[in-house]
């Protein structure tokens, strides 16, 4: 017989209760599994470890967040670490500095130009430069005008955290600036150049290069110039050469390092004639800069080179290297033309750079003429500049070297 309606409804209630209980139990179980998995996957609490700090700094850079780890990374260098930890910390400091400086430049470009006040008053950002300003945007009607309330936080630099302001009523102060670091921080990084491990030296050079983009640190970084020259002249490591030469090329070299530069000139020539393009480009840039110094020009020209030095002018070389080599040749030629240099009769070694480029047996003219039709326009233009400079050196009557008589490179046979 069929069930009565009250009995049927009772069974339906029981079924609903069982289904609800099963569903609730399943939900609780899944929630428990999720929480347990989250606890197991939680990263270790090792923020005091230098390696963890370095990884955290890199991770925050990728997400574009304020990297407050710069100060902690610098502080961690003061403690005794192994070579791997030091390299990783220095690498992360370099990334932080570049990131923070890039954000500062971006903010300056995005900031609208301040308009002069009609009453001749300076803009408020000028008056409060260097301070974090958070504005309460409530406007109070008062005496026929409006009063804008501002709260000024006088804290700054990378020495400590700022007092947080209410997000509803303040503007975020942005990331800490790398320029807020100190000269002691630069000295600390520079001390890493004395480490035995080459990877630590390389990362320290890269970090100093990053800080060299900040004007106020350049004089402090210059104090390590002699040490950098010593490293690149005594250690044959291509990556170290690139890092050291990039740092030197980013700094104005003071006169007191010229004696050391004379001693490392043969090493610079060897790097230039190596087969590592990045190191060659950096070496030739430094030599081009030094060729403009009157007291170093002869040392460069008299430096011994390989017999195949002119291979650097072959069209098969990378365009970036060819261009730098041609700039170097032009500056050497211009230096020889200067009255200061022509006032003295110089003596050169037979295998010197001067004889390779400007001597009687030199085949530089042939190489230059071949580069006039080079596929890259900047190489063509620079080759023409060198040709013009060499012709001018004949017009002004450069004194010949004591090895061989000077001659015209691009004559048409009238002097033969």
Image (cartoon, rainbow, N blue to C red):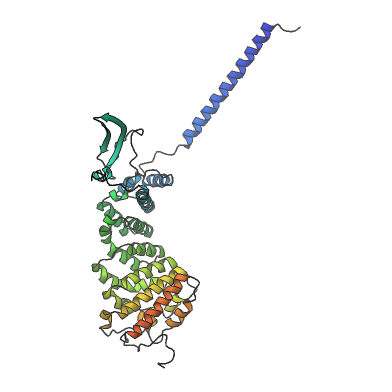
Image: 407 above or below 137? below
Of residues 205 and 397, the one drawn nearer to the viewer in this rendering: 397
Q: Quadrant of the N terminus?
A: top right
**Residue 291: x and y, percent?**
32, 73
Of residues 320 and 224, the one drawn nearer to the viewer in this rendering: 320
Point 31% across, 71% down: residue: 290
Image: 187 above or below 369? above
Determine the image quadrant of residue 26.
top right
Q: Does residue 351 appear anywhere in the picture?
A: no
Image: 395 above or below 8? below
User: Does residue 181 appear to the left or right of 374 in the view shown?
Assistant: left
Point 56% across, 21% down: residue: 24
Determine the image quadrant of residue 236.
bottom left
Point 30% across, 86% down: residue: 399
**Residue 129: x and y, percent?**
26, 45
Image: 52 above or below 384? above
């Amino acid at each position: 017989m069929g069930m009565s309606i009250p009995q049927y409804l009772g069974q339906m209630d029981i079924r609903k209760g069982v289904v609800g209980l099963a569903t609730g139990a399943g939900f609780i179980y899944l929630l428990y599994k999720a929480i347990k998995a989250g606890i197991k996957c939680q990263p270790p609490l090792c923020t005091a470890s230098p390696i963890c700090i370095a990884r955290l700094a890199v991770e925050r850079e990728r997400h574009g967040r304020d990297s407050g780890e710069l100060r902690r990374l610098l502080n961690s260098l003061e403690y005794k670490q192994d070579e791997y930890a030091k390299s990783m910390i220095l690498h992360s400091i370099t990334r932080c500095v570049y990131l923070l400086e890039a954000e500062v430049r971006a903010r300056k470009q995005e900031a609208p130009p301040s308009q002069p006040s009609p009453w001749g008053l300076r803009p408020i950002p000028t008056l409060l430069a260097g301070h974090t300003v958070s504005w309460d945007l409530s406007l109070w009607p008062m005496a026929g005008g409006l009063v804008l309330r501002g709260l000024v936080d006088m804290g700054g630099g990378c020495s400590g955290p700022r007092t947080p302001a209410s997000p509803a009523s303040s503007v975020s102060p942005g990331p800490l600036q790398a320029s807020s670091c100190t000269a002691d921080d630069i000295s600390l990084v520079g001390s890493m150049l004395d480490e035995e491990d080459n990877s630590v030296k390389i990362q320290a050079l890269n970090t100093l290069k990053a800080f060299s983009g900040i004007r106020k640190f350049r004089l402090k970084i210059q104090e390590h110039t002699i040490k950098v020259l010593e490293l690149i002249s005594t250690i044959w490591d291509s990556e170290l050469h690139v890092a050291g030469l990039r740092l030197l090329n980013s700094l104005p070299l003071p006169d007191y390092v010229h004696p050391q530069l004379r001693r490392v000139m043969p090493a610079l020539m060897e790097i230039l004639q190596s087969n590592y393009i990045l190191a060659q480009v950096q070496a030739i840039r430094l030599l081009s800069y030094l060729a403009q110094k009157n007291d170093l020009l002869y040392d460069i020209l008299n430096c011994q080179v390989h017999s195949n030095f002119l291979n650097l002018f072959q069209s098969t070389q990378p365009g970036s290297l060819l261009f730098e080599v041609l700039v170097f040749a032009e500056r050497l030629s211009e230096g020889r033309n200067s009255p200061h240099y022509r006032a003295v009769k110089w003596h050169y070694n037979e295998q010197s750079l001067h004889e390779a480029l400007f001597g009687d047996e030199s085949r530089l003219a042939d190489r230059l003429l071949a580069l006039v039709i080079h596929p890259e326009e900047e190489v063509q233009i620079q080759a023409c500049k060198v040709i013009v400079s060499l012709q001018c050196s004949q017009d002004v009557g450069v004194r010949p070297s004591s090895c061989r008589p000077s001659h015209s490179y691009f004559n048409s046979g009238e002097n033969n």
